[in-house]
Image (tube, rainbow, N blue to C red):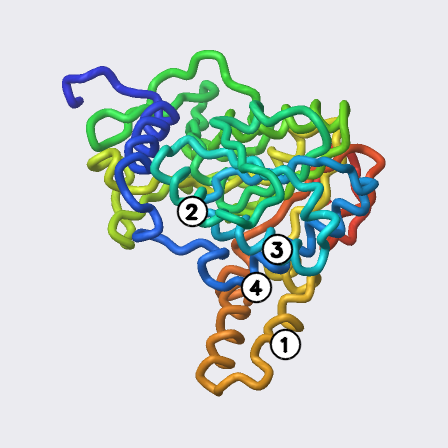
């Protein structure tokens, strides 16, 4: 024992990540899809335009992003909208969900002159203004704090942080989560209450006014279990409990639980990121960009497309889930008909 009171894992993770994002440049440790290629943002900008049309072309509407990083994705999307869907661009009111003052300034610079109206910032998705909304969140859910429970012969215990190790303590009241899964004794089940609250909140919002949300993240879809907590420090894997605030802590997203929490809304997916981007025309766009370029540049464009969509790279591990108001058409890239709160 460390001599201090053990800390519940989600509280440790929230504290560590708050310090990390306040004091470091996270993009020195990892690269997200928008930073790999402008094609990612362009493809999703076209997705926004088609989704907006399917919602009845509301004017104005909120175009929101949760966890916008450097602002690269929103900058690429709004540039595409201004060029090929000017009505959508003019109707969009850009709102960003970001808690880091430092990153807000980076985002402000990235979006200067790209939006029809001034950008608004919020600390939480729940703080977004009322009205029709299209929300995108790329690698946002994975950083939300998780709780870990261990199946025992007598029920469940919960993992707490004690120094640089874990200790299992008797679980109190269990949060809402996937505790009906047939988890073997001794195995770990993860639950992300904040992610489930986001899904429930969006479902309630989408029952009141038109809305669509697209979540893209790495994770799994099914009745799975296991320890997925991980840390990156200086671009390398690290022990997640060491030196809180110096590493980025993440966990895989449970898309099946997320969809169940959105009961009452229509859920589409999850589908793999590769299938989504290919269905939205990623490789055709890569071919267009590479045409008449020098061989080295053309190769780099095609390699970026493969990095985003190939099964052995980001294409399979990363998945996408769309949540929409009941009655709206399936968003682009999601061919399966929805069933409220269900994953197909």
Q: Disc 2 designates what residue?
A: 109
Q: Is residue 188 left or right of residue 73?
A: left
Mark earlier in primary sequence (2, 4) = 4
Q: Position of residue 292 (x, y in %)?
A: 57, 86
CA separation in Å, label 3 and label 2 = 32 Å
Residue at 64% across, 54% down: 45
From this view, report whether residue 258 is shown above or below residue 290.
Answer: above
Mark earlier in primary sequence (1, 3) = 3
Mark earlier in primary sequence (3, 4) = 4
CA separation in Å, label 3 and label 4 = 17 Å
Q: Disc 4 designates what residue?
A: 39
Q: Nearer the viewer, residue 75 or 335?
A: 75
Mark 4 neighbour class, 10 Å CA radius: few under 14, some 14 to 19, many 20 or more: many
Mark earlier in primary sequence (2, 1) = 2
Q: Position of residue 11 (x, y in %)?
A: 35, 23
Question: Mark 2 and 1 residues: CB-CB less than 8 Å, in contact?
Answer: no
Question: Mark 2 and 4 residues: CB-CB less than 8 Å, in contact?
Answer: no
């Amino acid at each position: 024992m460390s001599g201090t009171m053990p800390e519940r894992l989600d509280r440790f993770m929230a504290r560590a990540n708050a310090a990390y994002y306040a004091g470091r440049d996270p993009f020195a440790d990892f690269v997200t899809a928008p930073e790999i290629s402008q094609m990612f943002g362009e493809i999703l900008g076209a997705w926004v335009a088609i989704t907006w049309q399917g919602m009845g072309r509301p004017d104005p509407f909120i175009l929101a992003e949760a966890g916008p990083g450097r602002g690269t994705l929103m900058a690429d999307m709004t540039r595409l909208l201004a060029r090929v869907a000017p009505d959508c661009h003019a109707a969009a009111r850009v709102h960003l969900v970001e808690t880091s003052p430092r990153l807000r300034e980076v985002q402000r610079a990235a979006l200067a002159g790209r939006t029809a109206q001034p950008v608004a910032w919020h600390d939480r998705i729940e703080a977004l203004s009322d009205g029709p909304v299209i929300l995108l969140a790329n690698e946002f859910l994975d950083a939300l704090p998780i709780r870990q429970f261990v199946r025992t012969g007598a029920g469940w215990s919960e993992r707490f942080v004690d120094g640089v190790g874990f200790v299992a303590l008797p679980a109190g009241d269990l949060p809402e989560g996937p505790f009906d899964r047939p988890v073997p004794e001794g195995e770990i089940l993860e639950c992300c209450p904040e992610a489930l609250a986001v899904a429930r909140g969006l479902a309630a919002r989408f029952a009141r006014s038109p809305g669509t949300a697209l979540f893209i993240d790495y994770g799994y879809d099914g009745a799975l279990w296991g320890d997925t907590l991980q840390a990156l420090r200086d671009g390398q894997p690290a022990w997640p409990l060491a030196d809180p605030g110096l590493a980025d802590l993440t966990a895989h997203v449970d898309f099946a639980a997320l969809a169940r929490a959105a009961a009452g809304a229509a859920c589409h997916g999850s589908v793999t990121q590769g299938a989504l981007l290919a269905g939205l025309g990623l490789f055709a766009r890569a071919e267009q960009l590479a045409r008449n370029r020098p061989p080295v540049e053309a190769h780099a464009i095609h390699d970026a497309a493969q990095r985003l969509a190939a099964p052995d790279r980001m294409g399979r591990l990363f998945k996408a889930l769309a949540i929409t108001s009941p009655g709206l058409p399936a968003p682009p890239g999601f061919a399966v008909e929805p069933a409220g709160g269900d994953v197909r």
